[in-house]
Image: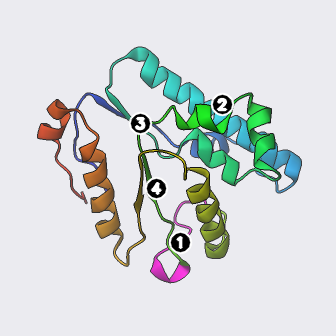
Amino acid sequence: MGLRTFCVHMGVLPEAASVVFGGGFPRHHTDVARRAAQRAIYHVQREVENVIVGEGLVAVALCDRGTVDGSAYWPGPIDEYWEALGTTLEEELSRYAAVIHLRTPSADRGYNHDNALRTESPVEAQQIDERILEAWKDHPHRLIVESQEDFLVKASRALELVRDWLPPCCRANAVLGVGS
């Protein structure tokens, strides 16, 4: 799938977990390592967002994930996650104008390991997806895109929702579609 173009006023941020794990951060399964990874992902996410917002060159920053997602991966009480990061759920929710949650597909609807950084089984991915859905439940502009048999249908719906949040100058010039 490819976004052909939106507008120069829109920035697409990299996924912080891919930056962290793709950069060699240890991916161990102990609680100590999982907490360290989630703190690292949170800080990378915040700093990438700070660059985009601080430069002032875009009106819309599209994130693959947000800082709230990490609470779904945290091994232990969610309150510990916010305490470890020196923030609150409310503060983090307020950082995002809208949240578009793309539901994770089940194994029979397309979940796969094409992304080498994806290590969860389909069942684990579904459980994490439920926790992420719960984590964002209080956001006033949370939109949900259900999994579809055809990923392109799901992607098209997500792009329509993104387009709705673009400034008028960008919305008029947005070409939404799936590239080859």
Residue 94 % position (x, y) = 52, 33
User: Please, what is the dominant secondary structure of the magenta stretch?
Assistant: loop
- In this rendering, is residue 123 above or below 75? below
Q: Cβ–Cβ below 8 Å for labels 3 and 4?
A: no
Task: Identify the element where label 2 is drawn.
Answer: helix
The residue under label 2 is: 43
Instruction: Please state which of residues 51 and 70 is positioned toward the viewer in this rendering.
Output: 70
Q: Is residue 125 left or right of residue 52?
A: right
Crowd rating for badge 3 (residues with CA inside 10 Å; few <14, some 14–19, many 20+): few
Question: Nearer the viewer's eye, disc 1 or disc 3?
Answer: 3
> Farthest residue in the left direction?
172
Which residue corresponds to the image point at 41% horizontal and 42% vertical from the top-left? Answer: 98
Is the residue under label 4 in contact with that under label 1 (CB below 8 Å)?
Answer: no
> Which sits in the foreground, 61 or 93?
93
Q: Are marks 1 and 3 in contact (CB under 8 Å)?
A: no
Residue denoted by label 1: 112
Question: Mark 4 = which residue?
Answer: 101
User: Marks 1 and 4, Cα distance to the nearest angstrom?
Assistant: 18 Å
Looking at the rendering, the stretch of residues picked out in magenta corresponds to: 107-118
N-terminal label among 1 and 4: 4
Q: Nearer the viewer, mark 2 or mark 1?
A: 2
Say whether disc 3 or disc 2 marks the residue closer to the N-terminus: 2
Q: Nearer the viewer, residue 120 or 96?
A: 96
Distance from the alpha carbon under mark 3 to that under mark 4: 13 Å
Quadrant containing the C terminus in the rendered view? bottom left
Amino acid identity at mark 4: His
Q: Which residue is disc 3 drawn over?
A: 97
